[in-house]
Amino acid sequence: MPQPPQFPRPRRGAPPPPPPLLHIQAPARRPPTRSKTPLVLAAGVAAYGLSLYAAYLYTTLKDLPPAPSSPHLQPNNAKVYNALASEYDTSIWFSELTMGLPLLRRALARRAHGHVLEASVGTGRNAAYYDMGKCASVTIVDSSREMLAVAQAAFAARRSGATTTRVRCVHMDAAAPLPPPPASVEGKYDVVIQSMGICSHQDPVALLRNLARCVKSGGEGGRIILLEHGRSRFDWVNGVLDRLAWGHARRWGCWWNRDVGELVERSGLRVLEVKRYHFGTTWWIVAVPPD
């Protein structure tokens, strides 16, 4: 018996089926375009401001005499540190933060172990980064009594309740004969660290030579680690540093246009590692006493 078709055909004489409806998709709505006018205006204002600042720097610097870069030709302004001590940290923390110096200070202090000497300690800006558990003793030295008092408080806050590491404060010039580490058989420090000391000392070569006498030899694991600022790799930066050095030294007590590499070389230290940042003005140096 024949089966009916699966899809029934229209009967003869019946009207044809209507054509299928076409689905017409509406065009997607484009998001409204934002005007670039505010960005262009902001860029113009920024460029105008930078040009004004550059013009100001040029007119200011061209009339300033360049300062000498030799320490023996530079006045000793270290006396300003006593007056700066109470406001020093709050005055420089933001500039150090924007330059990434806290990271370098952390790396510096984390290398401290055993008997440690920190010369030119200032207000103790490295104190927060010490791992006191690795230190048998820490001796901090500075020629400014007021700066040293701030540093003593910073180290006291760092070690309270956490460790029995002895912290000893010594008020003296770090270029003078320094006391040996407490309870040390060898009478030498395992690590000597210093940050921003070369720029502020009247005789940085004598200072570095004295630090070399205080630390164990390189073969015994002794290290001198320096975080300093000074001359750049670029002449145009050095020109700016030289012309602004007079005012900077009067305000902050340090000469930021000294040739750190030359001074370290003259001291006789054997350099193991050198890294430079910020156009070469920030120096990271690891050295050992001369053989």
Image: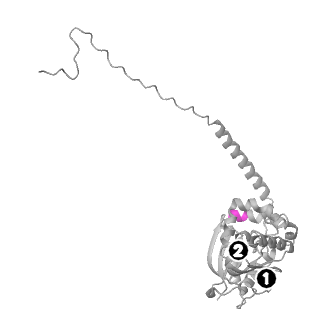
x then y, percent, for residue 163: 72, 76
Mark 2 vs mark 1, foreground winner is 1
Residue at image coords 68%, 76%: 133
Q: Which residue is mark 2?
A: 260
Note whether 45 is above or below 105 in the view shown. above
Tell me which corner region of the image, top left, top right, bottom left or bottom right, holds residue 195. bottom right
The C terminus - image quarter:
bottom right
x then y, percent, for residue 180: 76, 87
Instruction: Look at label 1 and name its amino acid.
Output: Ala
Label 2 – label 1 distance at C-alpha: 17 Å
Residue at image coords 66%, 37%: 38
x then y, percent, for residue 206: 76, 83
Note whether 265 is above or below 29 in the view shown. below
Helix, strand or loop for the magenta stretch, by majority? helix
Residue that extends furthest to the left in the rendered view of this protein: 1
Q: Which residue is mark 1?
A: 175
